[in-house]
Image (cartoon, grey):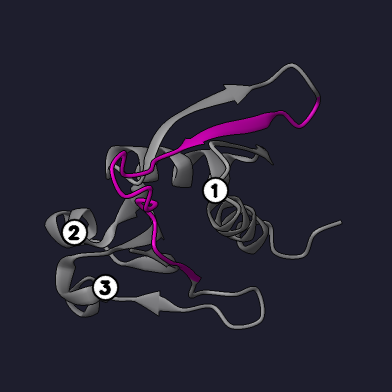
Amino acid sequence: MNTDPIADYLTRLRNAIKANHRVVEIPASKIKKEITRVLHEKGYIQSYRFDDSSVQGTIKIALKYNPSTKQPAIVNLERVSKPGLRKYAHYENLPRVLNGLGVAILSTSKGVITEKEAKDLNVGGEVLCYVY
């Protein structure tokens, strides 16, 4: 049993990027599917596919690399809110990652969204992670 599935998800992505893998397979959950959707919308991953053939299901993520320099699109993934210490942010005090170059992913009442979308919707929530 895993006590922090989001941290496990981010660690699997981080390890696959460091090993220069093209595809990574991760056990699925609703929150992981939503984080994957946000990463794809923001251009950090090339594509993804949900495989629901087994009981839990899996997420297959195709990682994105720069074709000329072979550098990954994701430089760093950082878990912010942890099971032992949750971090919440009001919509007026949402975090900025690298002066707007990165993305903070939040879990809100409107779903899993970025800090920019949360500011537009005037909604705060739990800060899950930073991606840049």
Real-space Cα separation, disc 1 to disc 3, in angstroms: 24 Å
Task: Decide: is 85 above or below 117.
Answer: below
Given this view, does label 2 or label 1 mark the residue nearer the observer? 1
The picture quadrant where one finds residue 127 is bottom left
Left or right for 83, reference 46: right
- Where disc 2 sits, the SS reads helix
Left or right for 60, reference 1: left
Task: Decide: is 95 above or below 10.
Answer: below
**Residue 61 part of the magenta-drawn span:** yes
Do the CB atoms of the residues marked 1 and 3 lie less than 8 Å apart? no
Residue picked out by circle 1? 20
Numbered label attached to residue 38: none
Real-space Cα separation, disc 2 to disc 1, in angstroms: 30 Å
Do the CB atoms of the residues marked 2 and 3 lie less than 8 Å apart? no
Can you give x and y, in whole percent of width and height, for residue 62 in the image?
A: 49, 33
Residue picked out by circle 2? 116
In the image, which residues are magenta? 55-78
- Residue toward you, 8 or 93: 8
- Where disc 1 sits, the SS reads loop
Q: What kind of residue is marked 1? A: Asn
- Where disc 3 sits, the SS reads loop
Residue sitting at x 62%, y 63%:
7
Identify the mark nearer the N-term, 2 or 1: 1
Could you tell me which quadrant the N terminus lies in?
bottom right
Residue picked out by circle 3? 97
Residue sitting at x 38%, y 45%:
39
